[in-house]
Image (spheres, rainbow, N blue to C red):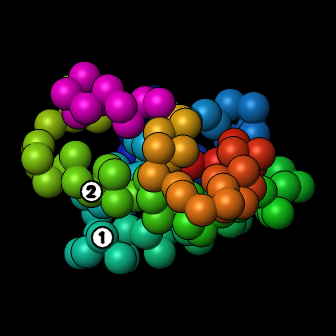
Amino acid sequence: MTDIELTRALERGELPNDGFHHGHHLRVGLVYLDESASVADAIARMAATLRAFAASVGKAEKYSQPLTEFWMYQLAAARALAPHVAADALFAACPRLLDKNLYLAYYSGDGAAARSADSSGNS
């Protein structure tokens, strides 16, 4: 399945919760960045898709807007450095993207947002 096919299957609600992992989130995010006119547009598309997905698997409360934005900005920064490479090559060049706990290095304060995001498993 290509990344575009994965994205369209997610949009149609055809993916099971247990079959959609961190790497899949990243691939969908890259598709949205490539298809959108701006990072803000890509974030809006990703947010809408993930909200619908979370609701479809009975876990609407698990969606995290801050975590979605974090990952989309990480992807946008990596994509800016390598605008025309495939996802696998981008992940090889930026392996930190594959660390689903990377966001923990960026949270400060009481950590409530990080704990909330960590318990959700969303990216």
Q: Split into 4 quadrants, where in the image is the N terminus? A: top left
Q: Residue 119: x, y in percent?
A: 77, 45
Q: Is residue 95 magenta?
A: yes
| Near-viewer residue (109 or 22) | 109
Binning the other alpha carbons within 10 Å of mark 2 as few (below 14), some (14 to 19) or many (20 upward) gives many
The image shows residue 49 at horizontal and vertical percentages of 59, 63
Q: Measuring 14% from the left and 37% from the top, which residue is drawn there?
A: 85
Residue 107, relative to residue 43: is it above or below?
Answer: above
Which residue is at a point 43% across and 30% down the rendered structure image?
Answer: 98
Judged left or right of residue 28, residue 77 is left
| Nearer to the camera, 47 or 64 | 64
Magenta region, residue range: 90-99
In the rendering, at what x and y percent does residue 25 appear? 51, 44
Residue 97 magenta-drawn? yes
Secondary structure of the magenta portion, mostly?
helix
Residue with the mark numbered 2: 76
Q: Quadrant of residue 64?
A: bottom right
For badge 1, the amino acid type reads: Val
What residue do we see at 37% from left, 68% from top? Answer: 42
Q: Is residue 26 above or below residue 39?
A: above
Q: Any mark on residue 2, and which?
A: none
Image-based side of 51 in relation to 49, left or right: right
Q: How many marks?
A: 2
Residue corresponding to mark 1: 39
Crowd around label 1: few <14 · some 14–19 · many ≥20 (10 Å): some
